[in-house]
Structures are given as C-alpha cells and as structure tokens.
Image: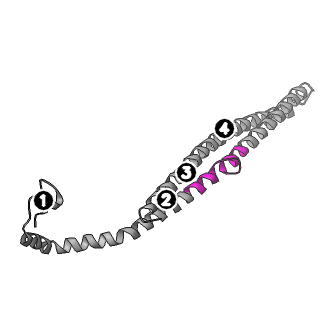
Amino acid sequence: MDLGSILGKGVDAINPAELVDLLTKHKDDLAATAQIARQLPGLLTMLASGLADAGNHAARAGRALSGASGATGRVGNSAATVSQISGNLGAVGGLVTKAADEISKVPLMGLPAGYLATAAKTVGDSIVGLDDLSNDLTELSALLDTVGSALEMLGTSLGATGREASKFVGG
C-alpha cells in the first residue's frame, strides 16, 4: 500500500506490517482518544448549556443592579433623600442660630442662648456628615450602575458563546 499516493506527496510509504505494529503498540492511546471523541459531544452540550445559563444569571444580576428599579436607582434615591434631610437640617440650624443670637440680647438669657448656639453647631456638624454620606451614596450608585452594565454585557457574551458552542453538536 502506498500511503504517499493516498495522503499526498512527501509522505513515505509505510509498510503494512509497520502500520499494524504501530497501531498495536499504541492501541491504549487510540482507545483513550476514541473514548474522548465519543464523550466530546456531551461535553460540548454541557458546556454550551452552562455558558448560556451563566449568561442568563449574569444578565439578570446586571439588571438587578442597574436602572431606576435596581440597586442603582434605590441607592441614588437614598442619596437624594439624605441630601434633602441635610438641607432641611441646615434650615433648622440657621433658625436655631438666629434664635440664639436674638435670645442672647435679652438680659440673663446668655446661658440658654449658648445652649442654642451649641445645638446649632451640632446640627451643622451633622450636616457635614450627611452631605458626605449623600456623596458616598451617589458614587456607590454610579459604581453599581457600572457593575450592572458590565454584568449585562457579560451575560450577553456568555449567552452568545453558549449558543455558538451548541452549534458544534447540532444545537
């Protein structure tokens, strides 16, 4: 048998006895390769299904994070609420400061006016903390939106990869 004529130029003719010897010598390797080849369609099906499922889960997680109804929207709404509370406390602090100033003008009311001034300062200090919290929540909202969008894109890519992989096994 001239394998060179079957396989193309540059392949030396192999003696049939050598071919049988080669096959006999590597029969375990050939059997393992055949087993892998038989299992490959099932593995590809499982891989394709797993990728598609992972894509669906990632996309769902992304949608849960992003948008007005997701975590992003809720954290953003919380930031706006905290900011509004801070503004309201600022107005209250201003009124308390004005009251302290006016009361301090009344004889013998210096001590109560001092208490009011201290209360106004405490309100002012609280406002700084609330403003910082509002800013942090706004930044967190933006971060969650970025992560959510990335998860949605990952989900889309994984789903597409799963669909492509299923084509290898007729899916």
Residue receiving disc 4: 135
Residue under the point 75% across and 34% down: 124
Q: How are the colours assigned in the image?
A: one colour
Give the magenta-colored segment's residue range: 58-78
Q: Earlier in the sequence, mark 1 or mark 2?
A: 1
Front residue (pair 165, 16): 16
The disc label shown at residue 4, or none: 1
Q: Are marks 2 and 4 in contact (CB under 8 Å)?
A: no
Q: CA distance from mark 2 to mark 4?
A: 42 Å
Q: Earlier in the sequence, mark 3 or mark 2?
A: 3
| Amino acid type of the residue that numbered disc 3 sits on in the rendered structure | Leu
Q: CA distance from mark 1 to mark 3?
A: 54 Å
Front tag of 3 and 2: 2
Residue receiving disc 2: 163
The disc label shown at residue 151, or none: 3
Front tag of 2 and 4: 2
Q: Earlier in the sequence, mark 3 or mark 4?
A: 4
Which image quarter: residue 102?
Answer: top right
On the rendered structure, is 39 left or right of 2? Answer: right
Q: Earlier in the sequence, mark 1 or mark 3?
A: 1
Residue 117 vs 168, above or below: the answer is: above
